[in-house]
Image (cartoon, rainbow, N blue to C red):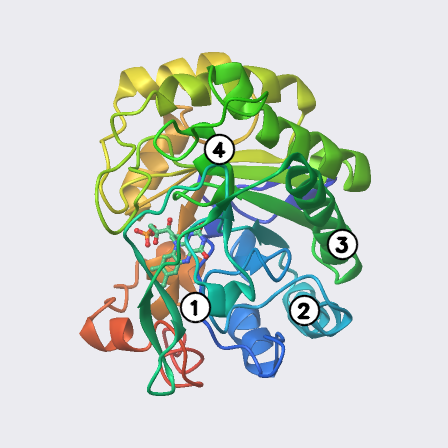
Amino acid sequence: MIFTEYPLAGDKLSNRVVMAPMTRSRTSQPGDVPNDIMATYYQQRATAGLIISEGTPISAVARGYSLTPGIYTQAHIEGWKKTTAAVHQQGGKIFAQLWHVGRRSHTEIAGEQPVAPSALKQPDKVYGPLAEGGFGMVETSAPREMTLDDINQTIRDFTQAAENAINAGFDGVELHGAHGYLLDQFMRTVSNQRTDQYGGNQENRIRFVIEITNAVIAAIGADKVAIRLSPLVGEGVDSDDSGKHDDIIDVTKLLLKQLAPLNLAYIHFSENIGDYTEATDEFRQHIREIYPNTIMVAGKLTQQSATELLEKGYADLVAFGTPYVTNPDLVQRFQRGVTLAEFDADARLTLYGGDEKGYTDYPPAS
Ligand SMILES: Cc1cc2nc3c(=O)[nH]c(=O)nc-3n(C[C@H](O)[C@H](O)[C@H](O)COP(=O)(O)O)c2cc1C
């Protein structure tokens, strides 16, 4: 089943295997511009049914990590065209992951004080410029609370970024609503203590996500819009369990009920990352009842566990992250039963920043 075609965004994917979004911080400077080695990297992986790009910031203030490729300048659009053309040349499909980090940033990276639903700082580190030169992990800055003007501007920024992505040749966009970034921050009480229509009860806390989704749909069409969510993961993905005991699962169910009639490309659940709760069969069945359309699942999947999810009807598409770091031809390896190249200590060292090493030099299986 994993190798069967699947309809998506008015076209069809050649199989159900998806390359999960992975930040690799290889852009050209100045301007965080997507470049030729990124095009090569994605082209090498284009036999996935679908690739989701690394998180791509929708504006300067949306940035939380240095060297990540934007989608808000003409240079970004031109740079991304190299990647989308390279993927399409191989018969692949690629969505852009639209990213706003909210409070998970630093003034030096965002270019101004980071913004968030509420002025609440979370102890956390992001990848940014070091005082002594070069890049490394730096403590986040305290954010300021977004005004209604900020909220409206951010909705426009998402819409513009989606239009830019389509102009750059992407087949669609995935809104990053997971991992404690801006959209997730609005949905959780641990990060959202607003007293206006964007805070308080659950309906209010999903309002921002719904408004962005509707605005992006109006701009590029529902079948090209997807969203990633991580209700089983704590808000501080890598750092602590803040938000884990929030009402985020109920909030997500409310959100899915409202998203179901919109006919989005897919809903993408990110699981098994950071501080997480295991997804039970009961959870998956309940989600299916609420959300009958396309569901994608990611998080420590193997060919076997992914196939089970497809066969049980819990997922329609299955996404792989780290296996794609070291196995550019993952689909062919699955098909031929070839042992996967391990995601080892060396692979971890070259995840973020640097050049071709550990990026485009993993060969396909012979
Ligand atoms: C190096 C690296 C960068 C990542 N960057 C992103 C990202 O930009 N956006 C995102 O939603 N998830 C990101 N993730 C999470 C992956 O998409 C995926 O959910 C996670 O790796 C679990 O799947 P896996 O066990 O198959 O690797 C990243 C993961 C890794 C390892």
- Alpha carbon distance from label 4 to label 1: 35 Å
- Alpha carbon distance from label 4 to label 2: 29 Å
Q: Which secondary structure, mark 4?
A: helix
- Alpha carbon distance from label 3 to label 1: 25 Å
Q: Which dot, 3 or 1, sits closer to the camera?
A: 3
Q: Quadrant of the C terminus?
A: bottom left
* Residue indicated by mark 1: 328
Q: Which dot, 1 or 2, sits closer to the camera?
A: 2
Which label was assigned to residue 80?
2
Mark 3 and mark 2 lie on one chain; the one further toward the N terminus is 2
Disc 1 crowd rating (10 Å Cα; few below 14, some 14-19, many 20+) is: many
* Residue indicated by mark 3: 166
Q: Position of residue 349 (x, y in %)?
A: 26, 76
Q: Position of residue 269 (x, y in %)?
A: 42, 36
- Alpha carbon distance from label 3 to label 2: 10 Å
* Residue indicated by mark 4: 186
Mark 1 and mark 2 lie on one chain; the one further toward the N terminus is 2
Mark 4 and mark 1 lie on one chain; the one further toward the N terminus is 4
Amino acid carrying label 2: it is: Trp
Q: Which dot, 4 or 3, sits closer to the camera?
A: 4
Amino acid carrying label 1: it is: Pro
Q: Nearer the viewer, residue 329 or 262?
A: 262
Disc 3 crowd rating (10 Å Cα; few below 14, some 14-19, many 20+) is: some
